[in-house]
Image (spheres, rainbow, N blue to C red):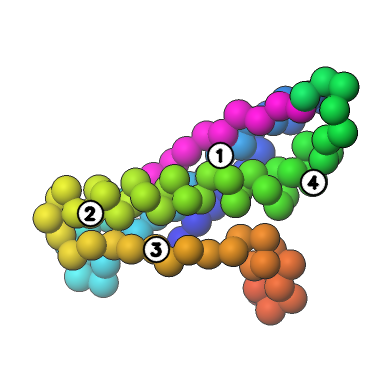
Amino acid sequence: MYNNRRIADYEDKLVYEMSCEVKDEGELFNIKCTMIGFFSVIEGKENMGLREYSNINAPAAIFPYIREIIASTSIRAEIPPVVIPPTNLNLLKRSPEINSEK
């Protein structure tokens, strides 16, 4: 399960939070990771709007780090490794099946 949200949205800066929680069925473990990304525009360069970026690219930029933290934490805890497969969040965001469930 994962959650994401814009924390702060300024004209030239974006603060974005993404969380992921993994539990096993037997309740042996519960790993939760929250990361915050700070994004800004480069003045004088062509940029994607920050709102658009926060909807599509910000989660895709943060998610690989969350996957790695969850995997390495489970290995260090000596529980069965929790490996979240690479996921194309941009594709999921555009998928009608996924978006219709909201």
- Check disc 1 and report its element: helix, strand or loop: strand
Question: Residue 83 bears which disc, if any?
Answer: none
Q: Is residue 59 magenta?
A: no
Kindly tell me whether residue 52 is visible in this rendering: yes
Whichever of labels 2 and 3 marks the residue nearer the N terminus, that label is 2
Q: Which residues are magenta?
A: 33-41
Kindly give the residue lying farthest to the left in the view shown.
78
Residue under pointer 2: 74
Name the main secondary structure of what is drawn in magenta. strand
* Structural crowding at the residue carrying mark 3, measured as other residues with C-alpha within 10 Å and reported as few (<14), some (14–19) or many (≥20): few
Identify the element where label 2 is drawn: helix
Q: Amino acid at mark 1?
A: Glu
Q: Is residue 77 above or below residue 44?
A: below
The circle drawn on residue 84 is: 3
Please rate how many residues cluster around mark 2, counting C-alpha atoms within 10 Å: few if below 14, some from 14 to 19, many from 20.
some
Helix, strand or loop at label 4? It is helix
Q: Which mark is residue 52?
A: 4
Comparing marks 4 and 1, which lies closer to the viewer?
A: 4
Instruction: Give the Cα distance between marks 3 and 1.
Output: 19 Å
Mark 3 residue type: Ile
State the CA–CA distance, disc 2 to disc 4: 34 Å
